[in-house]
């Protein structure tokens, strides 16, 4: 009987030793992974600013693709309505409500910046073909870091100027701050050729 108890005790110790060894191995792998990520980020910080910006843009390809989809939808809305984007969104600068904010990632739903983007988005989506305005996809409401997109309906100034800027759509990027090197930006094709400024 003592032999069986002794054998069971040894078997239990071996099982515990295996569990401890597996846990130590898993912890070592996690530490190694965290160390590699930290080393990689430190390496990115040593790169020239232009290269850093390009690396971040490649890493954030999903957001860039969403921006391009939104740009195409906005252009389609302009063509379908035969109107400037400012007419469609009801604002000459939806980004004005976001000016001066340091971090767009933690804005509450009631924030004028977030509300302004959602209002502009609904104006655009309701202008594309279809009987019922489409429900905005989650990725259209905010970028992957939780910040609303920033829209500048700049083409409207073309009516009074010789130079015609394009409408600009941007994500504030990983840092959530507008006008920093990690911003992701696309332009919306012009539609002003359908409009003639009075001479």
Image: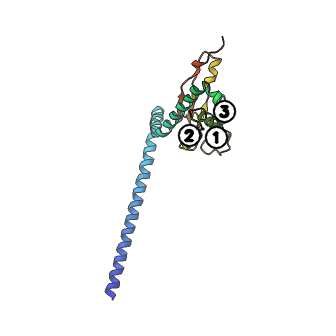
The part of the image, by quadrant, that contains residue 121 is: top right
Which residue corresponds to mark 3? 96
Closer to viewer: mark 3 or mark 2: 2
Q: Which mark is residue 149?
A: none
Q: Against 11, is 158 above or below?
A: above
Q: Position of residue 196 (x, y in %)?
A: 62, 15
Q: Nearer the viewer, mark 1 or mark 3?
A: 1
Q: Is residue 121 left or right of residue 6?
A: right
Q: What's the CA distance linking mark 3 and mark 2?
A: 19 Å
Residue carrying label 2: 140
Residue at 40% in and 60% down? 26
Q: Position of residue 35 (x, y in %)?
A: 43, 51
Between discs 1 and 3, the one toward the N terminus:
3
State the separation of the CA atoms marked 1 and 3: 11 Å
Which residue is at the far front? 131
Label 1 and label 2: CA atoms lie apart by 12 Å
Dot 3: within a 10 Å radius of its alpha carbon, few (fewer than 14), some, or many (20 or more) residues?
Answer: some
On screen, 149 above or below 30?
above
The reply to whether the C-beta atoms of the residues labelled 3 and 2 are less than 8 Å apart is: no
Q: Where on the picture, by quarter, is residue 131? A: top right
Q: Earlier in the sequence, mark 1 or mark 2?
A: 1
- Which comes before the other along the chain, label 3 or label 2? 3
Q: Secondary structure under badge 1?
A: helix
Q: Nearer the viewer, residue 51 or 163?
A: 163
Residue in front for this viewpoint, 115 or 1 = 115
User: How many numbered badges does the structure rendering display?
Assistant: 3
Classify mark 2: residues with Cα within 10 Å, few (<14), some (14-19) or many (20+). Answer: some
Q: Are marks 1 and 2 in contact (CB under 8 Å)?
A: no
Instruction: Please name the residue that numbered disc 1 is placed on.
Output: 114
Q: Which quarter of the rendered picture does the C terminus lie within?
A: top right
């Amino acid at each position: 009987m003592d032999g069986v108890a002794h054998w069971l005790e040894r078997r239990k110790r071996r099982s515990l030793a295996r569990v401890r060894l597996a846990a130590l191995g898993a912890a070592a792998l996690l530490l190694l992974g965290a160390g590699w990520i930290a080393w990689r980020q430190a390496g990115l910080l040593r790169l020239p600013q232009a290269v850093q910006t390009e690396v971040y843009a490649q890493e954030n390809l999903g957001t860039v693709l969403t921006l391009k989809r939104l740009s195409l939808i906005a252009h389609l809305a302009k063509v379908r309505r035969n109107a400037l984007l400012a007419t469609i969104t009801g604002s000459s600068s939806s980004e004005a409500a976001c000016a001066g904010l340091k971090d767009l990632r933690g804005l509450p739903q009631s924030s004028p910046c977030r509300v302004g983007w959602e209002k502009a988005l609904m104006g655009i989506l309701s202008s594309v073909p279809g009987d019922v305005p489409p429900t905005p996809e989650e990725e259209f409401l905010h970028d992957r870091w939780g910040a609303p997109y920033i829209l500048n309906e700049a083409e409207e100034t073309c009516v009074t100027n010789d130079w015609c800027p394009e409408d600009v759509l941007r994500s504030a990027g990983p840092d959530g701050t507008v006008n920093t090197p990690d911003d992701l930006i696309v332009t919306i094709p012009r539609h002003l050729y359908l409009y003639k400024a009075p001479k």
